Image: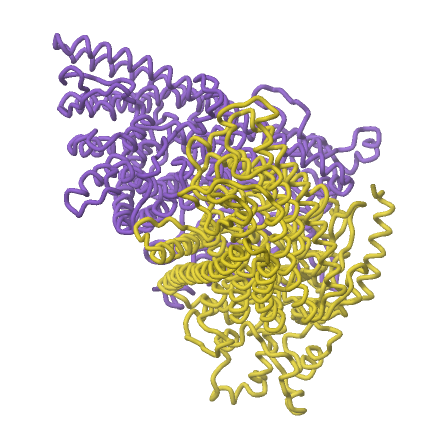
Chain colours: A purple, B yellow
């Protein structure tokens, strides 16, 4: 516990340090501000996060446009928003279909070839050749996937969920919503799933949906140099963020057939902006997305009238008699939740160490590709070994759901049970674990499978391939859950309702996934929707809640770990509980570069070019005289991007008369430049022009939000989070600017083991 | 379209009017500010709304307490919150059980008696006596219900959903969350359902849950004069609101067995405060509530291990073969949505006229009781007539689900089909309409039933009895939906999948309910959860969306109509689209009563007692001198309630030295007074004490949020809505107070047919 005296010392040290590092809002040498234990690598260093701005882009021109707009104009905008959401849903659904069909085809070809090969060599005894074939096939797929990711778009690695979480939180990871990223992501995920890695194709769908949304809503593609001249109104951060959240929801919806879960995911990650109409639109996008997927896949599989594939992963139908649970099972479910929390924490801890190791030693592209290939080879070998060593033979039924039953050393008419889990796409394995009748797997099979898949999945997450962690988590959990279920009736009193190990497999899957990703409401709903039955709602909630509480005791969720490792200035829901004694005065950057309402071009150029004062927002001040006293009062806020557009178009006061002939600077000019504003180095201003003046009053945000210096950190935090601010001006009693609070100033505080701690964050 | 010139005229008229009515934030004569077409009645006049305060109660004492609090302290608070949410769930579930069991018992007795009587008189031909018996029984129940509501707690009338919407929005309808209200509500709803009115017991559950939450979270009952001295930290609006939203969610959850739907309902109505942990807690309360209900009812019905009654209403299990829908049915569903929207709009319009009629002519308690009894008598008579005139006889099956099959004039072994819908609790009738096999009802039965029940339900809603509109809406919709389904196959090409009219009954129910209440995401989820099957998610969403779009074209949702008729200053999600040209200067109240930091007690007493300046928040100013100029700068904001506590405890500067011996005024004193602060009239100050000074700086909120005068209305609105403010201080360039924006100033603008219009609101 910190005493008040300690707090005072802290406060002083904060203040002095803040004053010395002054106003380096951006481009600080990131090495200096990175925690010591995490070494830098070139990839991470090259990332520079941008903070999104939901408020201050509302400059004068924008306000005037809105004032002029009629009732009909707003109605048209509203209709456009619905159309865009529909399009987002359709495109996201189509991408999901594409991934699904291609993966099924490729995996089908691969498994058929290997199966034939194994069958050929089982008799004659040269199975090492089969192993080699399998290893080579897997490595080849993964190599292609890893190469496109590392060479073309490293940001497309992983599931993309941490990046989308950051985007919805207000931090833009560079290039995260570009078309190129989408293409690389889609190809990458196909390769890695087809390559037999312990990964899923569901996580990347969320990222894909977000990219689709960011693209469609802007009515143009900068990469393709194509501007459709539509939806220009939506070219600003606030609107784009809303659409991206719809896209993420559509992605979840397509991945799991869970439209409500998708909406909740978006809201859980970025809900400072909830609004009934927006939610309804997000839901619409989700519904359209799952419907499109359903329709296309049904047509593809010639079951047009059935509409039975709402998502990429399908948990299958649980029979009505086996979905029932009895009161006595509830403690068992809670127990499973605790196991899931523990295993999840272990998974996250191992992955955390692995990621630090990777940041330190594995940062060259060739090394990364080689690591990915190695994992693929090991995965194939381990699977093969497990299948080879297993002697769990089951009779082959006529209506068998296994697509590739391997006979191997089993008697005729039998197949190897271990192969049904390893020699298959993970989605099918999950379904088998949920639905295959009691006795399909023996205990050893399940135990070994859990153990090996746990370490394989842990090793795989974080490789430079596009892949998600949802399905591997579900698979691990389903395996030990089924084990749990199979073990139960022998040791305790038996009831017919307990007879279904599939139910325990489902609970185990929920527990494991909850223990790893630590999502709450949205995950409950996603799992309920994927199960297709609300009866399990209560036990799934219990399991997830227990898993989260137990897991949180040890370590954070997997996505949060990765966000923290990348030093993203992520704002949580609330300020740390014990930060009430900090005020705006301590956390703000000070002194701040301010501009006069009428400012010399040269001064502006100098400030913008000076990398030491690399701010993104500048308070605009005006002089006021009270008797003998002369005060500089805040009258607005202008953004770096806006200044650059002004400089580019040379909107100088001296040119005002000649501008009468010219076109007046319009909102369109700002929108055309959005979101890739040119750097200040590309602006050239002659020596004469440096002496000109610029009138900022027309282009600044005339009413920025302000707080007094004494405002406590939680209040500042609340304002920042609720309104989605990028800059918050701190003023004194007479409205004089004394500092500027940015996202980074707030995100640096977090609760550590010993009270409040300061984080080191990447540059913004 | 309004031209700019018109806007300027508007602006000027606004400003002059605002300046003349000056700062009457409260207690304006409500007759003057009520729209002309709606006459006043005493009941409405006696209501005075309070605005909840989520921000400015954070005064200095509170901030200091939070600063002193340790990490462990915050953890304890968090655990308390979970415990409270659990308790809320348990109590809400128990109340639902109580209502359910008592209603079933009473209705069972009533229907048995009437059935016996009818059977007795069918042969001998004196059915008018049976009718009379039925009428008398119904009227008696309803009379009791209406008398307790009108005499003891008129606010307990209706479903309570509009009131809870207002509470979550930030407006407190007086006495809405008191224990007395809960008792009256529960008894009232039992009487009105048992009395056979066209009402449901589900809506009132939401209100009941909210009251439970408000009670449990405060750790005391003012009505019972019992203070448990626990949960004192939660005695402020922000915390209480969070718990009330959990209570409302628990209520929905218990009513429909829809925990996720409950959470979404709470969020849809008051989501400016979404926060992951809070949501998770709300979800926990919901889950506990439905689980408690399930457990208790299962034990009650001797089916302990089944847990098959998650909610008060149960849509029953839809068979897997009949839940499928085909692509061709989607246009039909959309069509049904449109019908639902139209019928819903008609329902709302009729009810709107009826409510105006009631406000004008039916405002004496005896008239209200008589009207309720009349409706009960008419309901019974109409039902009887319909049953009597119907000759739709169906064979009685052995496993018949009808509890009270009436033979009447049917042959032996047959029963009257009309009676299954009229002679039953509405919940059972809904279930029959969903699940009875094709051919149970003939077309005429369904048609007549829809028609009569539509008007009966419309007449019933708004009576002075506790009752909800969900079940009647579902019933009307299910009836015409089934009619729709039955009519279909004869006219179009037949497919086996179309054979189930129960599916169309469900869609009709969704359409009708959506058309009346116009909820969006939450209603979709509630219906999906009540159905127990996610397959219907997409069609239900389509139906609800269509119903909302069609209905909104004509008239608002039923709850919104009632909120508007009561002139509640309700803040919608966003400012009206075309209000960008209004600024804080035009909407604010000005001039404002300000206090000095060191203020004379007499001045404060005078201002607080003066009914003409009946503010609730007062900016505190301090004098600053700049050269020759003397400025009064804003330094804080203090609430009326805080001043009253200060005056009550006589916290005067002159007494400071004697106060050293006394106990210092603590946060506890404010908390003990919350939420029923004494009126100013109860404070007595001697003439000597009037000359004393009070130092407000210790008790005010030192950092109130402010905006400059030029801030546009949508920006002010956003700030207000996002942070849940009660007062927003408007300042000029040098931080001088120029006005105060309150909830009422913002709620008065709305989009009418001809652009922006001003509403007349009740006093606050």
The quarter holding residue A683 reads top right
Report x, y in % for residue B61.
Answer: 51, 72
Q: Is residue A463 above or below residue B592?
A: above
Q: Is residue B648 above or below residue B171?
A: below
Report x, y in % for residue B140.
Answer: 58, 67
Quarter of the image containing the N terminus of chain A?
bottom left
Left or right: residue B40 versus residue B251 is right
Q: Is residue B346 above or below residue B631?
A: above
Residue drawn where x is 29% and y is 15% of the image:
A111
Depth check: A468 or B732 in front? A468
The quarter holding residue A674 reads top right
Q: Residue furthest front?
A: B124
Residue B731 in sight from this viewpoint: no
Report x, y in % for residue A706.
Answer: 62, 55
Report x, y in % for residue B734.
Answer: 70, 61
Left or right: residue A63 versus residue A593 is right
Residue drawn where x is 32% and y is 19% of the image:
A195
Q: Is residue B177 above or below residue B332?
A: below
Left or right: residue A147 versus residue B634 is left
Q: How many marks?
A: 0
Depth check: A178 or B316 in front? B316
Depth check: B45 or A8 in front? B45
Left or right: residue B185 versus residue A230 is left
Residue B93 in sight from this viewpoint: yes
């Amino acid at each position: 516990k910190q005493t008040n005296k300690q707090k005072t010392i802290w406060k002083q040290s904060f203040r002095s340090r803040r004053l010395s590092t002054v106003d380096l809002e951006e481009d600080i040498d990131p090495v200096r501000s990175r925690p010591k234990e995490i070494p830098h690598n070139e990839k991470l260093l090259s990332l520079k996060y941008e903070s999104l701005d939901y408020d201050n882009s509302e400059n004068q021109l924008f306000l005037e446009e809105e004032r002029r707009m009629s009732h009909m104009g707003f109605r048209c905008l509203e209709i456009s928003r619905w159309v865009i959401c529909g399009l987002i849903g359709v495109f996201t659904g189509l991408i999901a279909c594409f991934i699904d069909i291609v993966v099924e085809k490729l995996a089908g070809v691969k498994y058929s070839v290997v199966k034939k090969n194994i069958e050929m060599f089982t008799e004659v005894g040269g199975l090492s050749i089969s192993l080699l074939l399998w290893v080579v096939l897997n490595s080849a797929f993964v190599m292609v996937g890893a190469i496109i990711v590392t060479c073309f778009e490293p940001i497309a690695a992983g599931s993309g969920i941490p990046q989308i979480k950051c985007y919805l939180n207000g931090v833009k990871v560079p290039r995260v919503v570009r078309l190129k990223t989408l293409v690389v992501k889609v190809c990458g995920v196909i390769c890695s799933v087809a390559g037999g890695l312990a990964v899923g194709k569901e996580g990347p769908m969320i990222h894909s949906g977000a990219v689709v949304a960011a693209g469609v809503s802007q009515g143009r593609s900068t990469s393709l140099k194509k501007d459709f001249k539509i939806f220009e109104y939506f070219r600003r951060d606030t609107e784009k963020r809303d659409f991206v959240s719809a896209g993420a929801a559509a992605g979840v919806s397509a991945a799991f057939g869970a439209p409500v879960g998708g909406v909740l995911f978006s809201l859980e990650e970025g809900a400072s902006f909830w609004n009934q109409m927006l939610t309804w639109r997000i839901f619409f996008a989700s519904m359209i997305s799952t419907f499109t997927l359903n329709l296309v896949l049904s047509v593809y599989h010639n079951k047009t009238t059935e509409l039975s594939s709402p998502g990429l992963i399908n948990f299958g139908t649980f029979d009505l008699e086996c979905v029932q649970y009895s009161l006595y099972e509830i403690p068992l479910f809670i127990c499973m939740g605790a196991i899931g929390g523990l295993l999840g924490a272990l998974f996250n801890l191992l992955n955390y160490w692995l990621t630090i190791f990777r940041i330190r030693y594995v940062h060259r592209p060739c090394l990364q590709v080689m690591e990915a290939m190695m994992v693929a080879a090991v995965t194939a070998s381990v699977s093969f070994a497990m299948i080879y060593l297993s002697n769990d033979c089951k009779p082959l039924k006529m209506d068998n759901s296994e697509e590739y039953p391997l006979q191997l050393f089993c008697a005729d008419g039998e197949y190897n049970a271990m192969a049904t889990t390893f020699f298959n796409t993970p989605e099918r394995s999950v379904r088998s674990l949920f639905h295959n009748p009691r006795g399909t797997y023996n205990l050893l099979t399940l135990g070994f499978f859990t153990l090996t898949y746990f370490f394989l999945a842990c090793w795989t997450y974080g490789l430079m391939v596009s892949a998600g962690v949802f399905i591997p988590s579900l698979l691990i959990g389903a395996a030990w859950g089924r084990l749990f279920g199979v073990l139960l009736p022998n040791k305790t009193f038996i009831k017919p309702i307990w007879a279904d190990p599939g139910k325990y497999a489902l609970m185990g899957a929920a527990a494991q996934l909850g223990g790893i990703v630590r999502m709450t409401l949205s995950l409950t709903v996603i799992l309920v929707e994927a199960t297709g039955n609300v009866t399990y709602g209560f036990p799934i909630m219990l399991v997830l809640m227990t898993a989260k509480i137990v897991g949180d005791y040890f370590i954070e969720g997997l996505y949060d770990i990765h966000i923290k490792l990348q030093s993203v200035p992520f704002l949580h829901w609330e300020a740390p509980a014990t930060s009430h004694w900090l005020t705006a005065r301590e956390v703000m950057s000070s002194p701040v570069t301010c501009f006069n309402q009428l400012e010399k071009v040269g001064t502006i150029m100098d400030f913008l070019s000076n990398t030491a004062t690399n701010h993104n927002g500048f308070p605009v001040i005006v002089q006021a005289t009270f008797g003998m006293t002369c005060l500089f009062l805040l009258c607005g806020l202008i953004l770096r991007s806006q200044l650059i557009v002004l400089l580019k178009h040379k909107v100088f006061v001296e040119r005002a008369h000649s501008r009468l002939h010219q076109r007046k600077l319009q909102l369109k000019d700002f929108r055309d430049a959005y979101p890739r504003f040119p750097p200040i180095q590309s602006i050239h201003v002659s020596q004469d022009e440096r002496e000109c003046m610029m009138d900022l009053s027309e282009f600044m945000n005339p009413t920025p939000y302000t707080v007094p210096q004494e405002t406590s950190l939680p209040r500042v935090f609340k304002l920042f989070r609720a309104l989605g601010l990028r800059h918050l001006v701190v003023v004194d009693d007479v409205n004089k600017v004394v500092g500027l609070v940015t996202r980074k100033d707030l995100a640096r505080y977090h609760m550590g083991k010993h009270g409040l701690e300061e984080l080191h964050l990447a540059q913004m």
